[in-house]
Amino acid sequence: MQSAKRVNIVSLKLVREGSVLYRERRVQSPEDAYRLAACPSRPEACQRLIETESH
């Protein structure tokens, strides 16, 4: 018989911190998710996305 092993117990809680209007209405790619998450909190990241998409 093997000795018992200690395991960690964790929890994860989702908390709504706010909301934004999303023009595309659906997240269909990882890039969409990144754009949605990055733009409200980091406008410079959003600007870089806009610049790279326009090239």
Image (cartoon, rainbow, N blue to C red):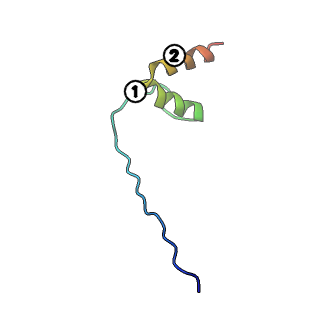
Residue 16 vs residue 55: left or right? Answer: left
Label 2 neighbour load within 10 Å: few <14, some 14-19, many 20+: few
Residue 31: percent from left, percent from top: 58, 30
Residue 20: percent from left, percent from top: 38, 28
Give the number of the mark in front: 1 or 2: 2
- Residue 36 vs 55, above or below: the answer is below
Do we see residue 6 in this rendering? Answer: yes
Q: At label 2, which amino acid type do we have? A: Gln
Residue 12 vs residue 5: left or right? Answer: left
Residue 5: percent from left, percent from top: 52, 73
| Labels in figure, total | 2
The residue positioned 51% from the left and 78% from the top of the image is: 4
Residue sitting nearer the eye, 6 or 34: 6
Q: Secondary structure at mark 2?
A: helix
In which quadrant will I find the C terminus? top right
Name the residue beneath numbered marker 2. Answer: 47
Do we see residue 29 in this rendering? Answer: no
- Residue 53 vs 29, above or below: the answer is above
Specify the quadrant of the image occupied by residue 48: top right
Residue 27 vs residue 42: left or right? Answer: right
The residue positioned 58% from the left and 13% from the top of the image is: 51
Residue 40: percent from left, percent from top: 41, 25
Q: Secondary structure at mark 1?
A: loop
- 3D distance between C-alphas at marks 1 and 2: 17 Å
